[in-house]
Image (cartoon, helix red, strand yellow):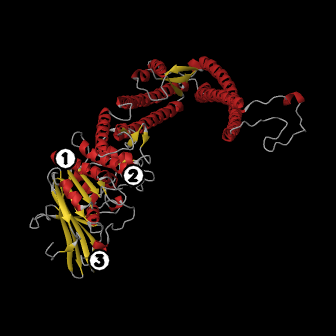
Amino acid sequence: MLRLRRLQLRAETSVGPYGADLTFGAGLTVIWADNTKGKSTCMQAMLYVLGMERMLSPRREIPLPHAMTNYVEDDDKERHTVLESAVALEVENGVGQVITIRRPVKSELDNRLVTVDFGPTLTNPNARATRRSFFVSDPGAASREDGFHHFLEHFIGWELPTVKRYDAPDGKLYLETVFPLFWVEQKVGWSSIPAAIPTYLRIREVHKRAVEFIMDLDAYRLELRRQQLAEQLAANANEWRGSLDEVERTVRRGGGRIEALPTKQTSLPGELAQAHVLIAENAEWVPLSLLMTRLRARASALSNISIPDVGSSADRLADELSQASQKADNLNAARLSAYSAKQLKNADISSLARRIKSLEEDLQKNLDVQKLQRFSGSAIEITPDRCPTCEQALIDTLLRQEALSAVMPVEDNIEYLRSELRMFKDILAREQEATIQLNRSIEASDREITELYARIRSLRTDLVSPNSSPSLVTIEERIRIESRLREYEQMEITFQNMVDRLKAISQEYSRLLAEQAALPREKLSHTDSIKLAHLTRIVREQARQFGFSTFDPGEVSISDESYRPQKEGFEIGFETSASDAIRLKWAYQLGLLELASSEKTNHPDLLVFDEPRQQSSARVSFQELLERASSAKARGQQVIFSTSEDLTVLKSIIAGLDCEALIFPGYLIKPLNSPSS
């Protein structure tokens, strides 16, 4: 809540101090003065002291007229130079805290300086209050601790949302975009419905964001959460893919491959339980667990027998050498065949890639021709004996005459090219997958040949060693088996760690999917729909009460897309008369105020209208507006209107209303030593 209590304007002039003091009560307060007598100066001064001048213009200029910046004029039309001036405003929030805000206008001090007295120092000049300085109209004023708008936001009890911007990172919704929904100033405030919200701040859909905040709608929070969930799901997929690539590289270096592991994140934990590692062994893929069992059994058997000498195992060693050599020849032949197959695959892949590129270029050209036909509104007749550009006849040709009989239409050609593209892309994908499998087989063969040649060297060494020497082959086999066991054990640990990591990613994926499914499918929540329907009823009722007559007020509704008044799905714009547009704006902004008394919103329970009787609105309409606004006091809300309506008429209107009237027969800013001040 924000309650205005007292406004003070002070200007030190060449003939002494001038100033004005306005006290605002609860409910409706009507300020009256003739045109050019300082009424709008007071209204703009309140915006200025709150740092809201950028609500009026992107320029950082003081929005106050000459009475506070250059000269004052008295009732005798004499002008006196303003030497120094300042504005002070006493306000109260929803918890009863009262502060006094002061800001220099013409001064030695920088006008970006705002000082706050923590106490009612205008209504009680003797009050003892601490004072603190803030800055405004400068970068950081809305986000840093010493920024005045950061302080004012929390003083009101708001927490402005983070919004998307066009040319900068996400940032807070500025106060300047929210205030126009309950503070209508005279110059540009009456130009649009629901409010003249500044767009130069580069906030995306700023009108929607401001209304969503002031009505405390869930719509933007839901939309933002949907975007956040989409980003988190994308990050989850990247994390899954990264973990998978990492373990695949580790397993591939060990001559293995991963089987039955999902390439994309899954919410089904059972799919991860089926994943396992296969190792290439003797031209076949063996599960890692089975291979480790075999190796442990062989290592145990070797450790239980004594190491034989060379002499006793010479015949066996010779036979084993012969078998190993034959196996090496076979493996080399198979490897050469695999390399040849790989070269052919690579050539096929390159050819397919060139073909796909050519098809894509042809498809794009045909799509361009189709686009030209659509733009021109007539089909381009393409014949083989005429140039498609200049229509010149093409007589010389190397084609047979029967080849010139028909040309496929552009639409058919596009479909044909698309089907060709799909076919060749499928073939390319299969060839690439076959190449991956071929590379894995080659890597396994290279590893097996390396181990086989090491064993052949050991066998040959044994056969030329003395008969009494221990068999090097047996010793090396023990070492090789133990080394492979250690390598496979490390691979298994790495694989299991990765599976555990993927399980955690899978659980997070399940949680994100569940949260995404729990969000409403509609843009608006049920509570949002109730609020908009309630606002529609209030706007219709008030539009009818204020004399809206362009069409039946019962046809007005509030759009659930733009939150603006609409008729039959179309926003209400120039089809209304100027006076009816003002009546509709009264109904909308007063409707937001009344809605806050029955629904949970972020409305500050304050409404300020500077010259609400625009476009010569009828007296009866203005009277109905004041009567409706006077009911704010019973709801604990505050409404402030400034007007230059005929004083006799105004007094007759407010005579029976529960409101306060501030009547200024001359200039509002007067000499402070004059009897009337």
Mark before the other along the chain sequence, 1 or 3: 3
Circles 2 and 3 in contact, beta carbons < 8 Å: no
The Cα atoms of the two marked residues, 2 and 3, are separated by 35 Å
Q: Residues within 10 Å of mark 2 (few under 14, many from 20)?
A: some
- Identity of the amino acid at label 3? Tyr
Disc 2 or disc 3, which is closer to the eye? 2
Mark before the other along the chain sequence, 1 or 2: 2
- Image coords of residue 431 (percent x, y): 65, 28
| Towards the viewer: 553 or 635 | 553
Q: Secondary structure at mark 3?
A: strand
Which residue lies under the disc numbered 3? 71
The Cα atoms of the two marked residues, 1 and 3, are separated by 40 Å
Which residue lies under the disc numbered 2? 578
Mark before the other along the chain sequence, 2 or 3: 3
Q: Name which residue lies at 53% across and 26% down.
A: 257
When the figure is inspected, residue 472 is found, relative to residue 124, above or below; the finding is: above
- Image coords of residue 572 (percent x, y): 41, 44
Q: Name which residue lies at 44% across and 22% down.
A: 271
